[in-house]
Image (spheres, helix red, strand yellow):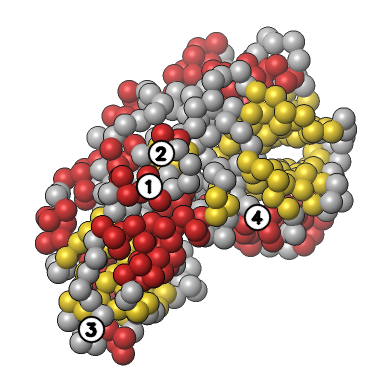
Amino acid sequence: MMDKPKEFCGVIGIYNHTEAAEMAYLSLYSMQHRGQEGAGIVSSNGKNVFRHVGQGLIHDVFYSHEIIEKLKGYMAIGHNRYSTTGLNSAANVQPILVNSKDGPLALAHNGNLVNSRTLRYELQEKGAIFQTSTDTEVIVHLICWSKAPTFLDRIKDALSQVRGAFSLLIMTPDMLVAARDPNAIRPLALGHIGDATIIASETCAMDLIDATYQRDIEPGEIIVIDQHGIRSDTIGQTPCRKHCIFEFIYFSRPDSRIFGEYVDKTRRKLGKQLALEHPADADVVFSVPDSSNTAALGYAHRSGLKFELALIRNHYVGRTFIQPHQKIRDFHVKVKFNPVGGVLKNRRVVVVEDSIVRGTTLRILTRMIRRAGAKEVHVRVSSPPIRFPCFYGMDFPTKKELIANRKTVEEIRQYMDVDTLGYLSIEGLLEAVPGDPCDYCTACFNGIYPIPVEKIRKSQYE
Ligand code: SF4
């Protein structure tokens, strides 16, 4: 329903905890924003592995405590899925579990591989039979087909062949392995609760279970955890950071810490920078809740304008709802947002939005804001115009559907029918994020893809 890029996935791994599956379940809850199509946990007691997966939200999949109790053992990996690659089907829900020559092998993956079609074709030519349409299964086959001498060498061999984004958890009955691609596109953090080790896509998953964040998994690093302790290795490729800058703009929760910084802090900076670049002669500023809240606070702080809550979001709308027989104008947006007339009437307002994809929802919202009495509507966007698709784990529509790919900023302003429209510049964005600007992927804004993408995949998004 919402005109937003879709979240990708979240992963969690726990080792050496008496309630490993329960901890994984709670952590998945806090990362529900990273995927709502399916979820699953695989656990192990050192000898046997146990799996429960399903389609839907966490509470749909793990609807009773008995389910968690059946996931025995001291280690577990879990996954929240959004289908960036592969269909939204039961077969594609992760963690994947196979019986390999090394015994049971479970995998949970966040990110997208950019050469998985080619690798899949080559594997099928050799005789591999795929059970799912995910790119993650390609990694499983590469590990199983590898002739390298040890299990860890087989993992390294597999990961040296794949290109793209992977924050990956691999589990055998007695070992947990975490790996991150050499560009570290998606976040992956390491922490602990007492003697237990935890690895999670976002640190908010650690906060919920009282775990302590230690550090990020390094680009191209492999962490192996087993009865001998924790050791760090590399997948043998030169690291070159290209973090997804969109994690700061929209995806990650503001209370998480990614790429070495708190999301909240960076998102406020985006709002402040936006206020510097695009001030507005207005009375109040407000956000399109919830993802734009923090940037709007930053904008209000720097501009000196009063921050208000002028759009109320209904958090209880399910993913499906019954449409009324009688046509209600803009019903699908109205059911989620309602403007606060008392705040808007006769006011000149600044609406802060984190990103515009197609522009359809924001157009309806600004119309609702005007109807509620706003005198002037100024839209400010805390990211640059999205002109290109993402191939590294985020689901954007095709190029033609991206409004900024076919319209200028002025044409978008006219389409939105607002008084002024201002986007954050790429330079301003890079100024606001922590560390070296070269450490970030900005391909959806400028079309400069840090990792080459196979042609067949690119053509799908034309
Ligand atoms: S293209 Fe955009 S969304 Fe995709 S990884 Fe790069 S910055 Fe993130």
Name which residue lies at 71% across and 31% down. Answer: 223
Q: Amino acid at mark 2?
A: Pro
First-in-chain label (2 vs 4)? 4
Q: Which mark is residue 431?
A: 1
Of pointers 3 and 2, the one earlier in the residue sequence? 3
Say which amino acid is labelled 4.
Answer: Ala
- Quadrant, the C terminus: top left
Mark 1 nearby-residue class (10 Å; few <14, some 14–19, many ≥20): some
The residue that label 4 is drawn on is 205
Q: Position of residue 319 (x, y in %)?
A: 46, 64
In-image side of 14 versus 234 (left or right): right
Q: Which residue in the structure is indicated by mark 2?
A: 437
The type of residue carrying mark 3 is Arg
- Tag 4–tag 1 contact (CB < 8 Å): no
Q: CA distance from mark 4 to mark 1?
A: 28 Å
Amino acid residing under circle 1: Glu
Q: Residue at x 11, y 55 (%)?
A: 411
Q: Residue 216, percent across and down?
A: 63, 41
Callout 1–callout 2 Cβ contact below 8 Å = yes
